[in-house]
Image: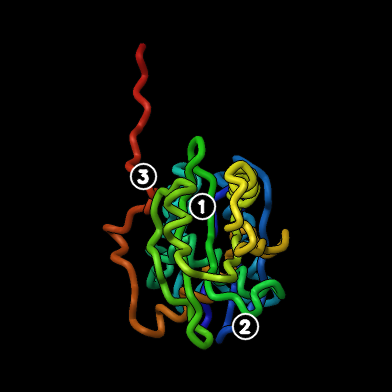
Amino acid sequence: MTILGIETATEICGAALISDGVVRSEKFLDTPRVHSKQLLPLIDSLFVDGRSRKEIDGIAISIGPGSFTGLRIGLSTAKGLAYALNKPLIAVNTLEALAHRARQDNSARDIDMILPLLESRRDEFFAAAYGIDGGALIEISPAMPAEMDDIVRMIQDRTRVLVTGNGMDKFKRLLAEKASTISEVFLFAGEQFRRCSAASVALLGEQRLARGEVADLAGLEPSYGKEFVAKMSTR
């Protein structure tokens, strides 16, 4: 099974191609506001050496939470490809994909929870919590807007929590301000393992497609994490 993965929920603009659980190619840019211009060229760069878009079995898209603009660009691109190629579309939660990526870090050994955090407004995050059962991620707390007190409640009696995502630096700062012994619980993913990854989106998408979990192509919308309110011009 071959899956195209697309990741645009944050400043990362990425695409990946995986086959039968193996990453064949992954391309990404860690540059803000390039998604609209660079996503399709990144996707095109995956299909070299005789590869064809028609050979894929499905398209996995990072559905949020995350950037309003980035999510809409990624989803509209994924939908256009799915319609044109007549392929199924698979929605993957961005925080779950972050947790999947963080598991590949050596720091992930002997942990009992993964806490992916994405930047949000002020002192908030988009957060979720995942446990590990064998080789599978198990959702403990679903994606939600969260402040530090919410996260403290989320970890409960956990003893080794791996934190990942672009909210890490803000989390460290707020954690230091609390001056609490709870900081001893947390480990932090390495630089390359804390970024959103199109390959993780594709690998999770492959698992979902194998279970028949495909999205409604016409009705699928981004999961912003908060209600999306369009700014109105005052002119």
Which quadrant of the view contains residue 209?
A: bottom left
- Place of residue 203 in the rendered image (x, y in percent of width and height, measured from the top left): 53, 76
- Place of residue 78 in the rendered image (x, y in percent of width and height, measured from the top left): 45, 60
Helix, strand or loop at label 3? It is loop
Proximity of marks 1 and 2: CB atoms separated by less than 8 Å: no
The local crowd at label 3, few if under 14, some if 14 to 19, many if 20 or more residues have their Cα within 10 Å, is few
Helix, strand or loop at label 1? It is loop
Q: CA distance from mark 3 to mark 2?
A: 34 Å
The residue tagged 1 is 9
Residue type at mark 3 is Lys
The tag earlier along the polypeptide, 1 or 2, is: 1
**40 relative to 213, above or below:** above
Disc nearest the viewer among 3 and 1: 3
Disc nearest the viewer among 1 and 2: 1
The residue tagged 2 is 22
The way the protein has been coloured in the rendering is: rainbow
